[in-house]
Image (spheres, rainbow, N blue to C red):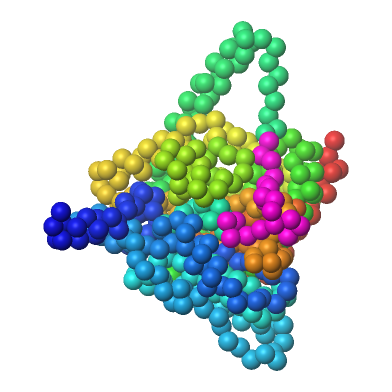
Amino acid sequence: MSVKNMECFQEEETFEPMSPSAQYLKSSALSLSILGVMEFELPIDDSMTMQLLRDVFLPVNPRFSSIMVTDKGVKKWKKVDVNLEEHVTLPTLPSDMSIDFYDEFFTNYLSKLAMEEFPPNRPLWEIHIFKYPTKTSAGNVIFKLHHSLGDGYSLMGALLSCLQRVDNPLLPLTFPSRKSNSKDHGTGRGYGFLRCVPKFFSGLTYTVYDFGWNIFKSNLIQDEISPIRSGVDGVEFRPIVTCTTTFSIDRMRQIKTKLNVTLNDVITGIITYGTRLYMQKTSKEYGEAKCTSLVLFNTRAIGGYQSVNEMIKPGSETPWGNRFAFLLVSIPKLTKKDESDSPLIFIKKAHQLIKRQKNSAAVHLTGQLLNLIRKIRGPEATAEYIHGTLKNTSMAISNVIGPVEQMALVGQPVKGMYFAVAGPPQSLSVTLVSYVGKLRIAMTMEKDFMDPNKFKSCIEYAFESIYSAALDSP
């Protein structure tokens, strides 16, 4: 083989095709990033940072050492040499300031970081080590990764490969079981068949309705302007602010068991109820505006995280990448009865809507529609379609399952964690992650348009109201 042919062969080896979803999420129409925050119990020792990144993080997946390039009109990943110092930032502040000062600085720092674009000549990830105490921790580490690298499941799996259990580093981290509440009460095949007939036709009806509604929502029908939707063009480029709150998962499971619903139903009901409360407390004129939430969920049929090696195997049942779909859930209007008597109606309506949509094939058909648009008009047009869906709705809700045990990074205990998504054309998004029996809720909203403290208090009030009403229910 000639030297020229060898050079061509080596150059081809450095390219890896980008998945369709990665192309959608990194385009001129849509660009999403994930900001993951880890809070530490003790002051951060960053002496092992470079070694950990070089020996553990980079080998997790070739995408962490690749940049996005266009080769003959096709987007691909190109392997490059990584200068780790370009990816790690340590803000420097005076050491004698108050916790309130550091806390406010960190909030503004996170907002500023969310607005910044990744340099095109470097892999799409950054780490920011904030070594100053805030109201919730002795120090914070921010992982900023572009969504094209993978979804929450993939990136959580990558993160967990760098962490160990505090109680016993030799044991693997474990995760909450994902059991369904549904039970088969059938007494025979004949009766089971008879029950399947109406279920089939109802599923067909729901599929036609939901698929049609998804198309109209993505192209023609916008939510009304409201206290949670400014509706301005380019909202994705406006500053954002993130605040968080924490709920007990055991208390949420009590609600789940009492009402015989799923944990996702409980979460969605609490958030939609709190959101509607915020809307009515903020504006009497627009408090009852029609609003839709986009509920995202992982499409992998799994009960926990697999190793990264398992994810990247060909034909893996838990593949690396972006494997998620979404449901459109209308936010119910709040009546006096709901507010003073039984806010459980929000849980019940969330349960009905999510169960109905999961009984339809609309999610699958929407995925096929995206593939069809990509084949006919290209990935940019597909990204525009997804952008339209996000823009026409009022908020997005997504969650990630975290470990049951406390974890540590190079022997440093992690007190808590949360994540936010930057770049969607919406004024509000709510993201959730479970960790050590707690559910951390991060509320990311358009700065100077929404009141983060008021919204947070409404979500907390919604949880307490629903919890009390559920325990008092027969």
Seen in the picture, residue 73 relative to 337 is either above or below; the reply is below
Seen in the picture, residue 225 relative to 133 is either above or below; the reply is above
Which residue is found at the position 57% from the left and 17% from the top?
196
Residue at far top of view: 190
Q: Is residue 216 magenta?
A: no
Considering the whole magenta stretch, tell me its main secondary structure. Answer: loop
Q: Position of residue 40 (x, y in %)?
A: 69, 70
Judge by depth and name the residue closer to the eye, 43 or 27: 43
Which residue is found at the position 69% from the left and 68% from the top?
412
Tell me where residue 449 sits by quadrant: bottom right
Judge by depth and name the residue closer to the eye, 437 or 421: 437
Judge by depth and name the residue closer to the eye, 338 or 324: 324
Residue at far front of view: 1
Which residue is found at the position 64% from the left and 73% from the top?
140
90 relative position to 44: left or right:
left
Q: Position of residue 326 (x, y in %)?
A: 50, 45
Tell me where residue 116 sits by quadrant: bottom left
Give the magenta range.
Answer: 160-179
